[in-house]
Amino acid sequence: MRFRFPASLALAACTLMSFSAPKPPIRAAEAPVTWSRQIVPIVYHNCAACHHPGGAGPFSLLSYADARRRGQQILDVTQSRYMPPWLPAHGYGDFAGERRLSDEDLALIRKWVESGMAEGNPAEAPAEPHYDATWQMGKPDLILSIERPYTLSASGADVFRNFVLPYPLAQTNFIRAMEIRPGTPQAVHHSNVLIDRTASYRGDHPADWKDGIPGMELELDGGNTFDPDSHFLFWKPDTPVLAEPSGMPWRLDPGNDLILNMHLKPSGKPETIDAQIGLYFDDKPATSHPMLLQLDDDRDLDIPAGDRNFVVHDELTLPVDVDVLGIYPHAHYLGHVLEGWAILPNGQKKWLIRIPGWDIDRQSVYRYRTPVFLPRGSVLHMHYVYDNSAQNIHNPNSPPIRVRAGNRSVDEMAHLWVQVLPVNVPKGSPDPRLLLEQAWMEHRVRVQPGDSIALYNLASAEAGLGEDAQAADTYRAILRDHPNDARTLNSLGAVLDKSGEAPGAEQSFRHALAVEPEACDPRFNLASLELIRSQFRDADRDFRALLEHCPNDPAAHNGLGLALAGEGDNASAESEFKAALALDPRNFTAQYHLGEIAIALGRPQDAIDPLSAAASENPGDVDTRERLALAFAQAARPDDALNQLREAEHLAPNNAEPHALLSQVLAAAGRLQEAIDEQTQALRLEPQDADGWNNLGVLEARNGKPDAARVDFEHALQLAPDDAQARANLAQLPPH
Amino acid sequence: MALPAWLLLLSCLPAAALAAQPFGVDLNGRPIDRLAPPGSPAIVLFFAASDCPISNRYVPEIERLEREFTPAGVHFWWVYPNPEDTSEVVRRHQEQFGIRGDVVRDTEQRLTAMARVTVTPEVAVFVPAGTTLREVYRGRIDDRYISLGQERPSAQRHDLENALHALLANHPIPLPGGPPVGCSIVPRSEP
């Protein structure tokens, strides 16, 4: 339908328009655009990180002569926004280090090139940035290298390869910064570093891990402790050093592996990939614990050949308040439009990222300039569009074919990782990461009920939150589909054990062992259960079986030591505790029990060293102080014994035992009145202790106060009428 | 409709007269006066730059084509037009990439002008015609790169290879299916 306006009206409108149009401002002749004044700051800020001698970019742009020679190309690639590389659309998330030229910058570059690329006054130019060919932050605390250099062939399709770098140290370290030196920056598109807590990837590829293993994605076994991935360890050529915010280092434990997942691009000649990872240690562990959440919809990826608009979606409701720190969208070659956003509880839509023209070659992690706060109840959304037509020039299949999810480059992926830091955590509430894990896994189980990994993680989160009955149910749900999954059986046993259902726990451990007789965890748990039930022979047998298959475990040696001690074989027990200490010189349990055995064997002198070590390892442990005091007392060092007991008293002022022990040591030293005071103190804290009253009576009698002693013995007999000792003592008192 | 080869040749770009001046210099600085050995049916000029990643990525492909067409007498030249590519730089580049073919340093950019190429990598194919060289193909090697930032995982259309097959079979030479993509050739003279 068309509307007609009377001609006069239209004219009037035009006239009005022309009157209201702003007049162009009158300006003085514009200053010329020169390299030194306007262009250098743009280039140094946006281009030089790669375009410097030896950098990842093909040529240097540091000098005027360099830039002038490339002027036309600089103009072309900046106007088309091919350079600098930056995928996210402006205004859909405010990212740190945004490599996007403003329209003003683009206009300046155009003007400079078109006006003949004047240099201007070099004195006006800022100082040239300095790029060091060595480590950017100085010598790292630890440098890891890939086991064998990899030769990337001169031509062919891009290569995705995973290199394993075992963490070689025997101590835990906290990593505040990491630098990757790929060896050949121009052949490395990007790298991801993953922490393999259980060295599972190496274990899965025993024969070839040293050469690197092909593959775009990989799955790692996180082990049995809740220890979620927390950091994006992503590297691309313009971010040589990955420094974490203060208080947020990541952790490496003995036995961990780093997996360097590299995207390599043949350069035209064979390239040697000899990557190194430099790690910089923090002296303190993390005080803030972020977590990586993953939205994904791989299950729905089944893209018909030729489909230009295939959409997948995922969402996740946040159970806690979070700050979003960073985001990492990921698809392969068919990804076209990648979007992430949050819907706040008030209905407001908050964009997290929008990539209108995905390009796997330019993938990156994006960190927010300031954290994006999302209140509890916000819903994270992932919305990806794929183009599986021949028009998508990235399409690896020609002609296009049906494509599903997978980890080869011809397969697809739909992942959106979000790094969140829980905030506003109420005092006394559980670890908010467990709540995030629970919400995330519940969601995954909802969309894919048979997802046994999600169920397992859910159960572990429930167990971590103390919802043991719920966790047991969830483990049982896995066992319905996988009745012989040894790990699930073991975890079910552990959670049953924790909730006091020892028979069920034992059955579960035994079932796991029937499936996998050499499995370490269920054997350890079964043996520990037997130990607690004082089934020392059984525990002895199972700890020995454990050590046969899983040697070098100090806890297993300690367990065997306790079983042997329980069987009365203190000498053998002693050598087990020594074996534990050889593996872990600071092992508290081994030190404590070595001391205890020495006392039991009548060698108090030998108990002093291990117990002192145990006390310094665990200074707040009252029991250790008391044993140490006993050792000192028996070794005729009453003053040292008194010191330890006073320390114990100080640690546990409401505990009667240190007072009672103090009383005995003081009595032995002949300090009867002090001994009586301490025993009185002990009985004030524990008035039902018949032995205590008897002891007090003895002290009073020795102190020449038979009347007071009589009252005490009678008190003891009132509490324990069959107390023969108290009765005998009473009888020995002089009659009234 | 297939045109007879002669008609196509005539309709091609204006013939370049064999220059009285040398085309360029070899790695020892000696002038190169002749590009086509006697009896050669065609010469291929591959314009390369030692510091251009896309140009470098085509080295194996050019070597493949050189191996394929040398037995038919086609002569390949590795032409370095950029001022940064001094003898020393080119020599190192050849060594690093294992290039064994003949090299011209286009010190005056006469070949660049004659072939009317603008980027590296780009190729021009000439056929000798009496005392002149006729350009029968100019442009991209294949369709791996659509534009800067738009790259196929592998080429689907091998334009240069198709052109050489057509030439040797005396068939009409197909035009490249798209523009060459790479790094602008750096002007020798002040712009």
Image (cartoon, coloured by chain):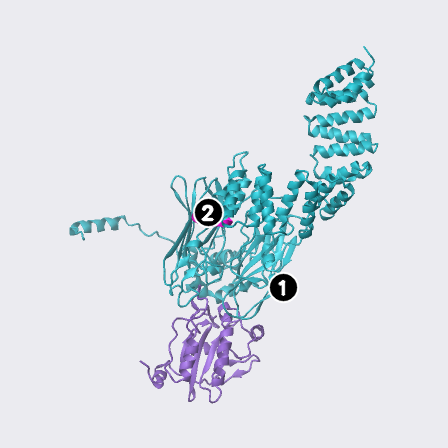
Chain colours: A cyan, B purple
In this picture, is B133 found above or below A554?
below
Amino acid type of the residue tagged 1 in the rendering:
Arg
In the rendered structure, the residue with mark 1 lies on which chain?
A
Looking at the image, which is closer to me, A609 or A705? Answer: A705
Residue at the extreme top: A736
Name the residue carrying label 2: A445
Name the residue carrying label 1: A148
Instruction: Assign a secondary structure to mark 1.
Output: loop
Which image quarter: residue A595? top right
Crowdedness near tag 1: few (<14), some (14–19) or many (≥20) residues, C-alpha within 10 Å: some
Looking at the image, which is closer to me, A354 or B118? Answer: A354
Q: Does any portion of residue A35 appear in the rendered image?
A: yes
Which of the labelled discs sits on residue A660, or is there none?
A: none
Residue A450 sits inside the magenta stretch: yes
Amino acid type of the residue tagged 2 in the rendering:
Val
Front: mark 1 or 2: 2
A362 relative position to A9: left or right: right
In this picture, is A225 found above or below A181?
above
Looking at the image, which is closer to me, A10 or A5? Answer: A5
Q: Residue at x 74, y 44 (%)?
A: A577
In the rendered structure, the residue with mark 2 lies on which chain?
A
> Is circle 1 on the same chain as circle 2?
yes
A582 relative position to A7: left or right: right
Q: Marks 1 and 2, Cα distance to the nearest angstrom?
A: 41 Å
Query: What span is colored magenta in the figure?
Result: A441-453
Residue B64 percent across, percent down from the top left: 50, 77
Looking at the image, which is closer to me, B172 or A461? Answer: A461
Residue A267 percent across, percent down from the top left: 53, 68
Secondary structure, magenta segment, majority class:
helix
A409 relative position to A613: left or right: left
Residue A402 percent across, percent down from the top left: 40, 62
In this picture, is B147 found above or below A455?
below
